[in-house]
Image: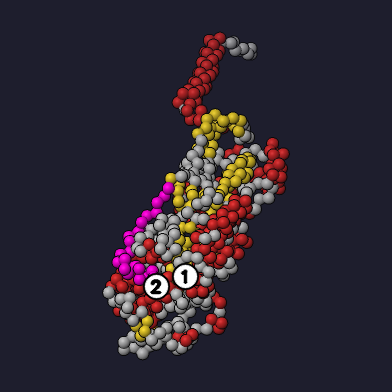
């Protein structure tokens, strides 16, 4: 049976071909439509976004850190400088393999674990394409090694920067303070826009107190870079505004005299100009090298400072709180005169001890262990100040009462921060019945008033507070908040004037003459420093107990451990008729005031007499800095 052979169906094939052609055209048109839509999105809708991303790969906005303001002493000697240094940084976005790059850098230049730790902390807090510092203070040989290998290190940059330098290190460590790397806490507290490109901030002292003024305002520049992040050209630049320069009241010659006079002893010296409140010298010993902190102090160096029993990081001038001892007696004498409880002729019997009415306890006078009796059968105000008679002031304190003492001593600045333009100042303690109730929830006892009358017990003062009180004694009531900074960018800075201490001229005269007898009187407690003196000095010695002495026992210095011995204090101003300097000295565990008043004499001599030595000291300092 014959088979049927199917014939072609041209109509069907044409329909299939047309359908396929139309489908292909639609697919092509759809794909072209997608391309057009995407092109429209890229070129029109999201043009600015992608243009910015493209520009970011080619153009970068770089911060320009400002130059930190310089710090000078009153003679123009540079105390805080900026020195050029080179910094190794990494732009993370430009690095193909960060860990491999860091490992290679460690093989080329020394990179410590602390450097890496700080790098990772900075990396997590930076802006995109912002360089992250890895190493500071590159040496010339290290820069050469990095330059030779530059082609193998995309994203790695070596930039020049200015780093803080302190030419005199320990001499001004507590007065000026120091800058250090910005830590994690500070990075959140500081305005990020103001500190872009800046890695250091003032930590303590003048450097921190005047941080806003010293820092300046950041600038920026737009730069064109290649694929490796290397700068090809600068497109736009806005210069930073440098920080203001500071001129201090401090005198480098006087500062050096005070520092060397203290020597190896723990203590502090504060010298002020009574007429202006300017701080002429501020020394705390021992000190430390401020340069150690600029780029991050090593663990070994920091441990040595932190664990030292002499506590070199502690600024005794503003943080040290000591019983003022007999240095409060001139103020107590003025309080007695002003209250009408005593007159210059009023006398008190002095057997070498004092006893409260109805109390069997004897409060000893310091002279008792030396003479076995008191200063004299009866003691008046001038003798009481000149010879530092405790019995006289025991009696005055009892009649004045602790709250009366507070009312008269508070205007001198005791018990309150002085307002000095530095950091970490403490307020001391000027006790009263209210103070003890608030601080300890306890009543005040009469025996505590006796101790406070000679600057012992709960009473505490800083050397700066004693210096301010001494300026009030020198000027007969007028005194200022102490100031380290004399001018900012050439504009004078006046010290705020404090409320004056009110007293009659006759009473001021009596107190000042009594303080004169301390130094120039035949039985003055500081008469040893009057030998060869060429001016009249008014002063007051003080001794502060460190440990208690039981009733009936005698303090014998040779039997007491060195760190348990009495502190020595001395306050003074000169010349008597027109004072130009007031000084407060504390020598920790010096055994008594005899350790302190020779230091004050050296400082005042240097200020009033030894101009040639002072000038030579300035010249030597300039040469040393150079």
Tell me, yes or no, whether the highlighted magenta stretch contains residue 511. Answer: yes
Q: Is residue 185 above or below residue 432?
A: above
Q: Position of residue 548 (x, y in %)?
A: 46, 81
Disc 1, SS: strand
In this view, the residue in front, 70 or 607, is 607
For the N terminus, the quadrant is top right
In this view, the residue in front, 189 or 435, is 435
In this view, the residue in front, 332 or 347, is 347
Q: Which residue occupies 50% across, 60% down?
A: 608
Q: Which residue occupies 50% across, 71% down?
A: 530
Task: Give the residue pinned by disc 1.
Answer: 570
Task: Give the residue pinned by disc 2.
Answer: 514
Q: Which residue occupies 33% across, 61% down?
A: 500
Quick check: can you spot residue 269? Answer: no
Quick check: can you spot residue 6? Answer: yes
Q: CA distance from mark 2 to mark 1?
A: 15 Å
Q: Position of residue 10 (x, y in %)?
A: 56, 9
Q: Which residue occupies 55% across, 49% down?
A: 78
On screen, residue 538 versus residue 53, left or right, reads: left
The residue stretch that appears in magenta: 492-514
Q: Is residue 32 above or below residue 389?
A: above
Q: For the residue carrying disc 1, how many other residues have a C-alpha within 10 Å: few (<14), some (14-19), or many (20+)?
A: many
In this view, the residue in front, 139 or 408, is 408
Question: CB atoms at circles 2 and 1 under 8 Å apart?
Answer: no
Give the mark, 2 or 1, whose residue is nearer the N terminus. 2
Q: For the residue carrying disc 2, how many other residues have a C-alpha within 10 Å: few (<14), some (14-19), or many (20+)?
A: many
On screen, residue 143 versus residue 466, left or right, reads: right
Closer to the eye: label 2 or 1: 2
Q: Position of residue 472 (x, y in %)?
A: 38, 63
Query: Which quadrant holds residue 301?
Result: bottom right
Disc 2, SS: helix
Tell me, yes or no, whether the highlighted magenta stretch contains residue 28. Answer: no
């Amino acid at each position: 049976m014959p088979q049927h052979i199917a014939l072609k169906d041209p109509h069907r094939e044409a329909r299939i071909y047309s359908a396929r052609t139309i489908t292909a055209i639609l697919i092509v048109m759809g794909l072209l439509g997608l391309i057009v839509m995407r092109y429209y999105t890229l070129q029109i809708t999201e043009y600015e976004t992608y243009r910015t991303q493209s520009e970011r790969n080619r153009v970068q906005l770089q911060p320009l850190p400002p130059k930190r303001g310089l710090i000078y002493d009153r003679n123009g000697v540079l105390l805080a400088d900026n020195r050029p240094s080179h910094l190794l940084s990494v732009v993370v976005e430009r690095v193909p393999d960060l860990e491999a790059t860091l490992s290679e850098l460690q093989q080329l230049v020394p990179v410590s674990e602390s450097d890496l730790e700080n790098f990772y902390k900075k990396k997590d807090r930076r802006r995109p394409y912002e360089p992250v510092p890895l190493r500071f203070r590159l040496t010339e040989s290290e820069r050469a090694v990095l330059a030779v290998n530059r082609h193998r290190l995309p994203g790695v940059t070596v930039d020049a920067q200015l780093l803080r330098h302190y030419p005199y290190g320990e001499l001004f460590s507590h007065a000026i303070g120091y800058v250090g790397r910005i830590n994690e806490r500070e990075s959140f507290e500081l305005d990020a826009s103001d500190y872009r490109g800046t890695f250091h901030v003032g930590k303590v002292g003048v450097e921190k107190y005047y941080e806003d003024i010293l820092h300046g305002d950041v600038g920026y520049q737009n730069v064109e870079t290649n694929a490796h992040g290397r700068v090809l050209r600068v497109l736009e630049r806005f210069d930073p505004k440098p920080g203001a320069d500071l001129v201090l009241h401090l005198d480098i010659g006087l500062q050096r005299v005070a520092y060397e006079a203290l020597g190896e002893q723990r203590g502090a010296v504060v010298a002020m100009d009574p007429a202006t409140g300017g701080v002429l010298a501020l020394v705390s010993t021992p000190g430390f090298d401020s340069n150690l902190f600029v780029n991050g102090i090593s663990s070994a160096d920091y441990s040595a400072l932190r664990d030292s029993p002499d506590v070199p990081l502690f600024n005794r001038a503003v943080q040290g709180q000591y019983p003022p001892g007999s240095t409060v007696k001139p103020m107590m004498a003025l309080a007695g005169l002003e209250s009408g409880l005593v007159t210059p002729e009023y006398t008190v019997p002095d057997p070498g001890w004092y006893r409260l009415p109805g109390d069997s306890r004897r409060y000893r006078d310091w002279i008792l262990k030396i003479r076995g009796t008191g200063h004299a059968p009866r003691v008046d105000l001038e003798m009481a100040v000149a010879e530092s008679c405790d019995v006289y002031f025991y009696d005055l304190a009892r009649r004045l009462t602790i709250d009366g003492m507070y009312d008269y001593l508070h205007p001198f600045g005791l018990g309150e921060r002085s307002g000095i333009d530095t950091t970490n100042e403490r307020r001391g303690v000027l006790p009263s019945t209210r103070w003890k109730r608030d601080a300890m929830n306890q009543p005040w006892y009469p025996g505590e008033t006796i101790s406070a009358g000679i600057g012992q017990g709960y009473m505490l003062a800083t050397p700066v507070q004693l210096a301010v009180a001494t300026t009030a004694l020198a000027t007969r009531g007028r005194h200022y908040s102490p100031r380290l900074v004399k001018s900012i960018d050439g504009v004078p800075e006046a010290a705020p004037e404090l409320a004056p201490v009110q007293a009659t001229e006759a009473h001021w005269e009596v107190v000042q003459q009594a303080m004169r007898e301390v130094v120039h009187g035949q039985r003055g407690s500081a008469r040893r420093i009057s030998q060869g003196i060429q001016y009249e000095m008014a002063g007051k010695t003080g001794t502060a107990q460190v440990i208690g002495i039981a009733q009936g026992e005698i303090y014998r210095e040779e039997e007491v451990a060195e760190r348990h011995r009495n502190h020595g204090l001395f306050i003074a101003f000169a010349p008597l008729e027109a004072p130009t300097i007031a000084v407060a000295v504390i020598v920790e565990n010096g055994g008594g005031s005899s350790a302190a008043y020779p230091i004050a004499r050296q400082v005042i001599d240097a200020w009033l007499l030894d101009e040639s030595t002072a000038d030579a000291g300035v010249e030597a300092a300039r040469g040393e800095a150079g």
